[in-house]
Amino acid sequence: MAVEIERKFLLASDDWRRSVVKSAHIRDGLVAFENGRKVRVRIKEGVATIAIKSRHRGLGRFEFEYQIPVSEAEEILRTMCDGRHLEKVRHYVPHDGLMWEVDVYEGTLEGVVLAEIELDREDRRLALPSWVGEEVTGDVRYSKVAMERERVKKGRRT
C-alpha cells in the first residue's frame, strides 16, 4: 500500500525560478470527493493516471495510482468531473537533496502558486529553501477543492 507524505507551502519569492530543472503541464480532474477522500484523473506529458486517495492521517495518506489510456482520461474529464478540473504547470526545483514541486495554476486558479515536497517519512528534517514561505500543510483553505470553491464563489470561474 502506497503512502503519500507531503508538505505544502506558500512562496516567499520567485527565486525558485532560477533553479528549475524541468517543467510539465498537468490537467487534473476531480471525479469524486467525500470526507477528505478523493478520486482524481490526471494527464501529464501524454501519460494519464487515475488516483484514489484516503483522508490525511497526519502528513500522510494512502494513495493508489494507476496508468490509464489518455483517451479514457479525456472522456472522464469531459463526462465525470462536472467542470472540476484544473490546469497547472509543475516546475521541479532541487534543493538539499530533495525535489520540490512548484505548481503555477492556470485558468480557474490563475495566480495561485504553491510549493510541495514529498517525503519518505513524516519526521524527516527539512531544510527550507529561501524562496519558501508560510507552511500551509493541513490548512483546508489551500486544498484544491477549497480553492476552487472560493474562486467560483467570487465569480472567477472560467
Image: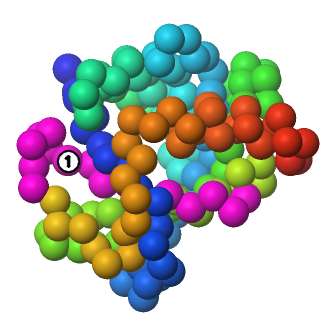
Q: Residue 72 vs residue 38: left or right? A: right
- Place of residue 27 in the rendered image (x, y in percent of width and height, measured from the top left): 63, 46
Q: In the image shown, does 48 or 121 lie closer to the viewer?
A: 121
Outermost front residue: 134
The amino acid sitting under disc 1 is Leu
Q: Nearer the viewer, residue 4 or 56?
A: 56
Q: Secondary structure at mark 1?
A: loop
Query: Magenta includes 65?
Result: no
The residue nearer to you, when weighing 80 against 88, is 88
Name the spot of residue 11 as percent of width and height, x first. Answer: 47, 67
Judge from the rendering whether residue 27 lies leftward or rightward of residue 129; answer left or right: right
Is 115 covered by the magenta stretch?
yes
Q: Is residue 118 visible?
A: yes
Residue 122 % position (x, y):
15, 39
* Quadrant for the N terminus in the image: top left
- Identify the magenta region: 110-125
Q: Name the residue rendered at 42%, 47% in the picture.
A: 136
Q: Residue at x 85, y 42 (%)?
A: 154
Q: Is residue 2 above or below residue 11?
A: above
Task: Characterize the magenta stretch by its predominant secondary structure.
Answer: loop
Q: Is residue 75 visible?
A: no
The colour mode here is rainbow
Q: Quadrant of residue 133?
A: bottom left
Disc 1 packing (10 Å; few <14; some 14–19; many ≥20): some
Identify the residue under disc 1: 119
Above or below for 139 versus 21:
above
In the figure, residue 61 lies in which quadrant?
Answer: top left
Image spot of residue 30 (x, y percent): 62, 28
User: Which residue is rendered at x = 55% and y = 11% of the image?
Assistant: 34
Measured along the vertical axis of the image, is residue 6 above or below residue 91? above
Tell which residue pokes out farthest to the bottom in this image: 18
Exactly how many numbered labels are in the figure?
1
